[in-house]
Amino acid sequence: PDKKWSERPLATLVFTNNTETVSADELKEYLKKDFANYQIPENYKFIDEVPKTSVGKFDKKEIRRLYAEGKL
């Protein structure tokens, strides 16, 4: 949720191995090349695994629920 835009994107990121690191500020700078400012997420959450549905798709409802409950 966002007061100005109604909704804003939330970036949830999973590293492919434990040696990779990147900060939210580095990601924002990288995205500025190809996206308008309002499209760039303000919030970045680093997670171990993306929740998936029973058919293997990303479970956006579960991600929203976890975020709303403060678990992300």
Image (spheres, rainbow, N blue to C red):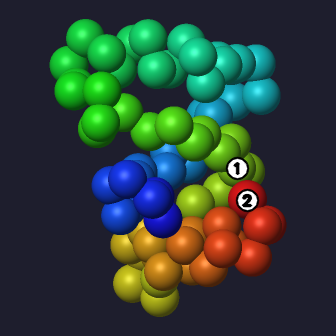
| Front-most of residues 54 and 34 | 34
Which callout, 2 or 1, points at the residue further toward the start of the chain?
1
Q: Position of residue 6 (x, y in %)?
A: 35, 64
Mark 2 vs mark 1: give the one in front.
2
Residue with the mark numbered 1: 47
Give the residue displayed 66% in from the left and 74% down from the top.
68
Q: Where is residue 41 in the image (x, y as percent from the top left)?
A: 44, 39
Q: Residues within 10 Å of mark 2 (few under 14, many from 20)?
A: some
Say if 2 sits above or below 28 in the image. below
Give the residue displayed 25% in from the left and 11% down from the top.
33
What is the C-alpha distance between the residues marked 2 and 1?
A: 8 Å
Locate residue 36: give its quadrant.
Answer: top left
| Front-most of residues 8 and 3 | 3
Say if 2 sits above or below 14 in the image. below
Q: Is mark 1 on a helix, strand or loop?
A: loop
Left or right: residue 65 versus residue 29 is right
Q: Where is residue 34 in the image (x, y as percent from the top left)?
A: 20, 19
Residue with the mark numbered 2: 72
**What amino acid does circle 2 point to?**
Leu
Give the residue displayed 65% in from the left and 45% down from the top.
45
**What amino acid does circle 1 point to?**
Ile
